[in-house]
Image (cartoon, rainbow, N blue to C red):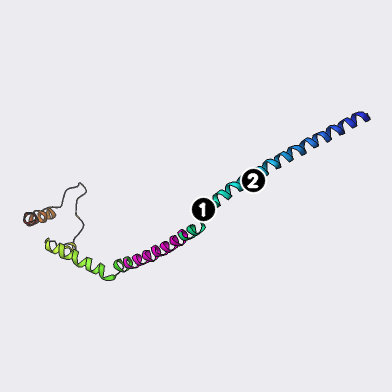
């Protein structure tokens, strides 16, 4: 029995030493990797010109600020151009003038219009039919004038 327990103890110690060796090997590999990364960073630092990089960053910031100022100015100009109350009134006047030139008087034609009167069968009321036929020559004359 004692030999068995000594054998198990020795086996456990050998397993522990093997694990310790694996941990040490892993640490060595990590140190080598960090060393190679450090060498690569040294090369990158040597190739990078800090003065030039700082100058480029400063120029970028300056141009970015200029762009923001120009954008704000354009926004202000566009807001002033499109937000004025006179623009809507002027547009209404121009629309009315164009319609007047075409011979269309929208206000007078729209006032007093009633809904179409039809029977359930879908036939038109004779009075409405007469009104339409009376208006046809005038509408044809206007169309020919265009």
Which of the labelled discs sits on residue 35, or is there none?
Answer: 2
Which residue is located at x 30 percent, y 66 percent?
82
Which residues make up the magenta segment?
Answer: 56-77
In this figure, which residue is indicated by the disc labeled 1?
Answer: 48
Any part of residue 21 in sight: yes
- Closer to us: 110 or 22: 22
Any part of residue 107 in sight: no
Which quarter of the picture shows residue 132?
bottom left
Q: Secondary structure at mark 1?
A: loop
State left or right for residue 1 relative to residue 31: right
Rendered-image quadrant of the N terminus: top right
Tag 1 or tag 2, which sits nearer the N-term? Answer: 2
Q: Residues within 10 Å of mark 1 (few under 14, many from 20)?
A: few
100 versus 27 height, above or below: below
Q: What separation in Å lies between label 2 and label 1 (alpha carbons)?
A: 20 Å
Which residue is located at x 45 percent, y 58 percent?
56
Q: Position of residue 114 (x, y in %)?
A: 19, 59
State left or right for residue 109 relative to residue 145: right
Q: Position of residue 40 (x, y in %)?
A: 58, 46
Which residue is located at x 29 percent, y 67 percent?
81
State left or right for residue 51 relative to residue 146: right
Q: Secondary structure at mark 2?
A: helix
Q: Is 120 included in the stretch rendered in magenta?
A: no
Disc 2 and disc 1 in contact, CB within 8 angstroms:
no
- Closer to us: 84 or 143: 84
């Amino acid at each position: 029995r004692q030999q068995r327990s000594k054998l198990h103890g020795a086996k456990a110690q050998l397993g522990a030493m093997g694990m310790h060796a694996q941990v040490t090997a892993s640490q060595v590999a990590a140190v080598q990797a960090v060393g190679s990364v450090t060498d690569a960073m040294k090369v990158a630092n040597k190739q990078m010109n800090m003065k030039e990089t700082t100058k480029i960053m400063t120029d970028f910031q300056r141009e970015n600020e200029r762009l923001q100022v120009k954008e704000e100015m354009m926004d202000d100009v566009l807001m002033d151009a499109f937000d004025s109350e006179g623009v809507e009134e002027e547009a209404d006047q121009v629309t009315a003038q164009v319609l007047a030139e075409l011979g269309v008087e929208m206000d007078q034609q729209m006032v007093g219009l009633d809904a179409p009167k039809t029977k359930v069968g879908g036939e038109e009321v004779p009075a409405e039919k007469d009104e339409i036929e009376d208006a046809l020559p005038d509408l044809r004359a206007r169309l020919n004038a265009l």
